[in-house]
């Protein structure tokens, strides 16, 4: 998935109110950018970090820049926009690039299910059980090469796990897909110490036959592409 507008480099001044970030552009201008990430962004919002932002000229948008990447300046990037994984996965599903889900032709995003919930993707194919796919963006890395989820307490995430467990119990496929928006990780784990309730819900969903898969991404200031399957520890 290519970025709609070429990204430009900047320096992070501060992130605040979750969805706002003051940044300095290369010409020295200081502006406010939109930060499309409700999580803690642990390790990704240190003042002085080199970042990449996407400019826009949409008159309907108050902020003319959107924060997209953290540049670790060692050849690795982290994608911080939590809306991008769904867009990237939709493109991959349509191109049949996810082997575990490649048999399904009908791809329905944002479908209502459960108790006032929406599933990221509902996949359907004649002769096969429906597949309910929930996508989670993974950006936390506290141990070298290990990505962790979540990076903060997520009651919403625990609720989704309960809904997926019910779907699996009804004979449909329930898939939790962790998309690692980092280029420096080789496996995924649950951050039990950050959210024990989520970890407990995850274990219960596994017993109910939840399928868990994880993929990493190739990230550059030009595009984000889903790449290789990763083990979930």
Image (tube, rainbow, N blue to C red):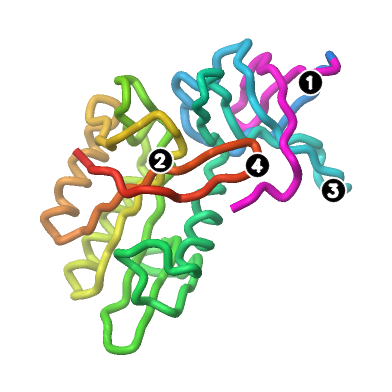
Among numbered discs 4 and 1, the one appearing first in the sequence: 1
Structural crowding at the residue carrying mark 3, measured as other residues with C-alpha within 10 Å and reported as few (<14), some (14–19) or many (≥20): few
Q: Which residues are magenta?
A: 1-27
Q: Is residue 129 above or below residue 204?
A: below
Residue contact at pointers 4 and 1, CB within 8 angstroms? no
Is 9 on the left or on the right of 112, as rendered? right
Which residue bears the numbered disc 4? Answer: 222
Q: Is residue 104 above or below residue 127?
A: above
Q: Quadrant of residue 25?
A: top right
Residue beneath the point at 61% across and 45% down? 223
Q: Secondary structure at mark 1?
A: strand
Structural crowding at the residue carrying mark 4, measured as other residues with C-alpha within 10 Å and reported as few (<14), some (14–19) or many (≥20): few
User: Disc 4 vs disc 1: which is toward the camera?
Assistant: 4
Residue beneath the point at 26% across and 55% down? 162
Is 175 on the left or on the right of 210, as rendered? right
Which residue bears the numbered disc 1? Answer: 25
Which residue bears the numbered disc 2? Answer: 180
């Amino acid at each position: 998935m290519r970025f709609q507008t070429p990204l430009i480099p900047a320096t992070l001044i501060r992130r605040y109110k979750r969805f706002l970030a003051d940044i300095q552009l290369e010409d020295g201008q200081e502006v406010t950018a939109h930060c499309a990430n409700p999580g803690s962004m642990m390790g990704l919002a240190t003042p002085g970090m080199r970042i990449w932002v996407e400019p826009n000229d949409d008159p309907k948008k108050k902020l003319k820049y959107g924060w997209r990447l953290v540049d670790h300046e060692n050849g690795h990037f982290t994608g911080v926009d939590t809306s991008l994984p769904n867009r990237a996965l939709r493109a991959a599903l349509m191109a049949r690039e996810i082997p575990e889900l490649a048999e399904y032709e009908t791809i329905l995003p944002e479908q209502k299910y459960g108790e006032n919930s929406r599933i990221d993707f509902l996949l359907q194919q004649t002769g096969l059980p429906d597949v309910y796919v929930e996508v989670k963006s993974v950006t936390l890395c506290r141990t070298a090469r290990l990505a962790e989820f979540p990076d903060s307490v997520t009651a919403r995430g625990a609720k989704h796990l309960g809904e997926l467990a019910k779907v699996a119990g009804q004979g449909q496929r329930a898939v939790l897909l962790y998309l690692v928006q980092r280029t420096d990780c080789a496996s995924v784990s649950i951050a039990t110490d950050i959210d024990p309730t989520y970890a407990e819900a995850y274990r219960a969903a596994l017993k109910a036959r939840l399928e868990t898969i994880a993929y990493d991404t190739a990230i550059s200031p030009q595009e984000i592409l889903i790449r290789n399957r990763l083990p979930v520890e």
